[in-house]
């Protein structure tokens, strides 16, 4: 039997994954070695993470689950 997962829960999992990736990339870039250019790092990792956080915050407020 298939389980249904709410859209908000799916977005929260996405935040978790992107935030962990962004933190890992930040730590690697600052403390280990410079793999990516700073502009690439910001555009690929940080902007999508912040955008999804803002979207989920908006979705939570809209559904009253905040």
Image (cartoon, helix red, strand yellow):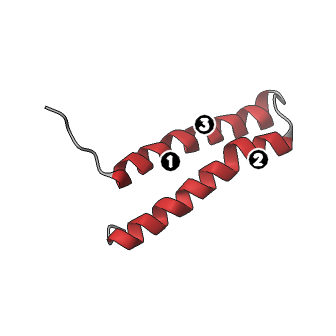
Q: Earlier in the sequence, mark 1 or mark 3?
A: 1
Residue visible at 54% across and 57% down in the picture: 53
Q: Which mark is residue 42?
A: 2
Residue visible at 60% across and 36% down in the picture: 21
Q: Quadrant of residue 27?
A: top right
Assess disc 3: are there few (<14), some (14-19) or many (≥20) residues with their C-alpha within 10 Å of its C-alpha: some
Q: Gap between marks 3 and 2, in whole Å?
A: 12 Å
Q: Which mark is residue 41?
A: none
6 or 35, which lies in front?
6
Residue visible at 42% across and 44% down in the picture: 13
Residue visible at 35% across and 52% down in the picture: 7
Q: Earlier in the sequence, mark 3 or mark 2?
A: 3
Q: Which mark is residue 15?
A: 1
Q: Earlier in the sequence, mark 2 or mark 1?
A: 1
Circles 2 and 1: CB atoms closer than 8 Å: no
Q: Position of residue 20 (x, y in %)?
A: 56, 39
Q: Secondary structure at mark 2?
A: helix
Q: Is residue 5 left or right of residue 13?
A: left
Q: Position of residue 8 (x, y in %)?
A: 37, 55
Q: Secondary structure at mark 3?
A: helix
Assess disc 2: are there few (<14), some (14-19) or many (≥20) residues with their C-alpha within 10 Å of its C-alpha: some
Q: Which mark is residue 21?
A: 3
Q: Position of residue 14 (x, y in %)?
A: 48, 44
Q: Quadrant of residue 1?
A: top left
């Amino acid at each position: 039997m298939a389980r249904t997962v709410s859209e908000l829960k799916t977005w929260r999992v996405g935040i978790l994954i992107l935030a962990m990736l962004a933190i890992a990339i930040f730590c690697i870039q600052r403390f280990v070695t410079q793999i990516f250019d700073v502009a690439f790092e910001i555009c690929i990792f940080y902007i999508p993470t912040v955008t999804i956080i803002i979207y989920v915050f908006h979705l939570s407020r809209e559904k009253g689950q905040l």
